[in-house]
Amino acid sequence: MLIDHWPLLGLRLNTPRLELRLPSDNELADLAALAAEGIHDPDRMPFLVPWTDLPPAERARSVVQHHWLRRGNWSPDNWALNMAVFENGSVVGLQTIAARDFAVLREANTASWLGARFQRQGIGTEMRAAVLKLAFAGLNALEATSGAFEDNASSFNVSQKHGYELDGIDRHVVRGRPATNRRLRLTRSRWETHEHIPVSISGLSPCLPMFGLPTESDTDHQRSAS
């Protein structure tokens, strides 16, 4: 079975009302269609790469291509897990966690988007809680990073709820105009004091080598040998 070779297919994050996991092909099509419907007002651009400026059909195709790309170039030293977010069985958005040299740095970055009709319902806060639980409790991260442009108050508010602190700014050119991105950082200790939404993780153990980490059996062996 494919899951024997790609165990990430069995990874599940569950909150009281959401499930985060890799989508099937048909679910990926649903995710692409959701992006084609719209993610933000046309006079704003919350993304560094303005992929949502593409016409709807091309925007949908870019979601599919990006998903395939991140699966295809996955390595333990450079990975990005693009998890579809489901509410009551329907796709509502995408939550990403990514890292380079994670086994050494223990630092992961998160990013996300929600379909326009699912925004302002608390879903963004809950899906961020899920992926932070994966980072800190599942993968033993030390820090998590994120960011939001100055006019993206909703994303910034989600980060504040989880205890992120300001970590400086970056200046970019987006749509030919200057844009200031506020970097955000969350330490493990601050996450532990702010984490409150229940999250369960299943199917993680066989995935650990894909994140550059030892399996639980390897860890137990090392402990017994010492």
Image: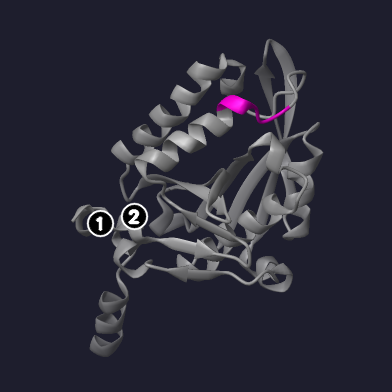
23 shown above or below 149: below
**Three-letter residue code for mark 1:** Ile
Residue located 41% across and 49% down the image: 22
163 shown above or below 46: below
Q: 152 or 24, which lies in front?
A: 24
Q: Quadrant of residue 68?
A: top left
Q: Which mark is residue 9?
A: 2
Q: Quadrant of residue 38?
A: top right
What segment carries the magenta color?
36-40
Residue 141 shows up from this direction? no
Q: Is residue 80 left or right of residue 17?
A: left
Q: Main secondary structure of the magenta part?
A: loop
**Which quadrant, please, contains the C terminus?**
bottom left
Provide the secondary structure element on which disc 1 rests.
Answer: helix
**Which quadrant, please, contains the N terminus?**
bottom left
Which color scheme did the rendering employ for the protein?
Answer: one colour
Q: Mark 2 near mark 1, Cβ–Cβ under 8 Å? A: yes
Provide the secondary structure element on which disc 2 rests.
Answer: helix
**Three-letter residue code for mark 2:** Leu
Question: Marks 2 and 1, Cα distance to the nearest angstrom?
Answer: 6 Å
Q: Residues within 10 Å of mark 2 (few under 14, many from 20)?
A: some
Q: Which mark is residue 3?
A: 1
Mark 2 vs 1, N-terminal side: 1
Residue located 26% across and 53% down the image: 6
Q: Is residue 137 left or right of residue 179?
A: left
